[in-house]
Image (cartoon, coloured by chain):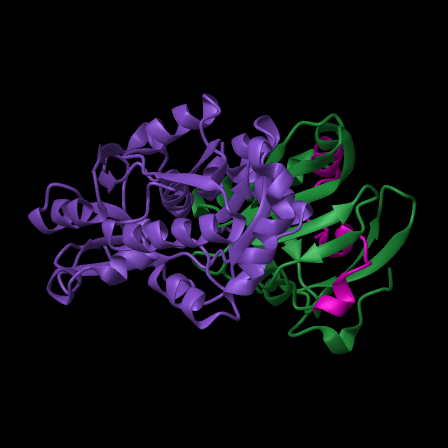
Chain colours: A green, B purple
Amino acid sequence: MEDMKYEDVNGDSKESRLKYHDGSERTVLVTDIEIPYPEGRLIVSSTDQNGVMTHVNKSFVEMSGFTKEELIGQPHCILRHPDMPPAAFKDLWDKVQAGERWQGYVKNLRKDGAYYWVYATVIANIRDGKVKGYTSVRRKPSRKKIQECIELYPTLF
Amino acid sequence: MTYQFTVSPDFGPSHIAGWQIFNTWMQQQLSESIHFEIYNSFEEQRQAILDDSIDLIYANPYDAATLVRDKGFTAIARPSNKSVEAIIAVNSESDFKSVEDLKPGIKLASTDSPDVHMMGMIMLEPANLKAENVELTKCGSYVLVAKQLLRGTCDAGFFLEEAYHDLSPMVRNQMHTLVSSEIQIIQHVLLVGPALANRKDDIIKAIVSMNDDPKARGVLESLGIASTEIMEQEDIEFMIDLMDALVD
């Protein structure tokens, strides 16, 4: 994945270096701007077994700030916000690879450096008894739960 | 042999005559005897599914998982550009102006339509509401849900969007919509069961031809369906995965 570009970012940003599970690294630029979750929508995406995006719905595209073409073929962790503890994603992968569903509150990073909170459910797509990929469905979280995560997540690094 | 066709019980009486015509038309296309059975509730229909009494079904998305993964049904078609959407409404004179205004302990009116109820409960999550902290009144129809709101016996109600807009303007004007879903991906689906699976290609051919035949298109229009599109098995598997992800 390419580093984020200053020309894509809106507002004052802070730079952060993220390390991913496969050992790769990327510089991300984050702002303090929160984008509210759109009412009544579901944000849906699917990946292959390696977490590379194969499907994104319209709400996903709109909230991410990327185009559909920019997203398909990219690793899902393109949305990872540096405020998210790596332990949360380890738990996610451990669970879904074992065929269990994972649910949790996630702060996602947009292309423009802003962020949005979601309540995500991730499940394995099982076809003929084999895991073919993963689907994630996000819905609007409550502010109370977001506040709990804002307090908890910094303690998990 | 006489096969059995049924439709999701969430279709109101205004659509039943259309489904009857659809069934007659399908029998002519396949030269098969197919009985059209209407179930009064989702519970009755689920029992019929478990008893292997159904061969062709226009199914509620909520039941697709059982039909496809447990009972070996395969996908035929879905309506183009028509998805199941839900509305949460309140009495227009109430103090509730957004979902977040609803508090634990509220009285909620809903129907036995499982997809609409599920979507309604999801849209209540931002207010920290769940099955355990709401008081649920199950109603036999969306008109009865509206009555609960107008009488003030319930604080909020779940509606199928289509049914909400079918309510009389006088009733609708006394309610206020807090939120409407825009999920777009949850749809009713036409599925064929194992006993009729050997005619799947003929059923698909018949469905495709409906879009081009003015008479058949009239049947679809009476069902509120502008046109149909053929579904690949992966399409239905994907929708079932989504439903799985949404059902707690």
User: Any magenta on residue A10?
Assistant: no
Q: Which of these two is toward me, A127 or B135?
A: A127
The reply to whether residue B188 is in sight is no
Residue B140 drawn at (x, y percent): 21, 38
**Picture quadrant of residue A102:** top right
Q: Which of these two is toward me, B97 or A82?
A: B97
Residue A61 drawn at (x, y percent): 64, 64
Q: Which of these two is toward me, B209 or B91?
A: B209
In the image, residue B55 above or below residue B144: above
Residue A15 drawn at (x, y percent): 77, 62
Quick one: which residue is furthest to the right in this view? A23
**Picture quadrant of residue A29:** bottom right
Quick one: which residue is furthest to the top in this view? B51
Residue B87 lies left or right of residue B184; in this view the side is left
Quick one: which residue is furthest to the bottom in this view? A7
Residue at the location (26% across, 57% down)? B164
Q: Which of these two is toward me, A90 or A40?
A: A40
Residue B154 lies left or right of residue A69; in this view the side is left
In the image, residue B49 above or below residue A57: above
- Work out which quarter of the rendered image holds the N terminus of chain A and state it: bottom right
In the image, residue B2 above or below residue B28: above
Residue at the location (72% across, 52% down)? A80
- Work out which quarter of the rendered image holds the C terminus of chain A and state it: top right
User: Any magenta on residue A73?
Assistant: yes
The kind of secondary structure the magenta stretch mainly shows is helix
Quick one: which residue is furthest to the front in this view? B31
Question: So how many labels did they put on this image?
Answer: 0
Residue B166 lies left or right of residue A133; in this view the side is left
**Picture quadrant of residue B139:** top left
The reply to whether residue A143 is in sight is yes
Residue bounds of the magenta highlight: A68-93
Residue B3 lies left or right of residue B236; in this view the side is left
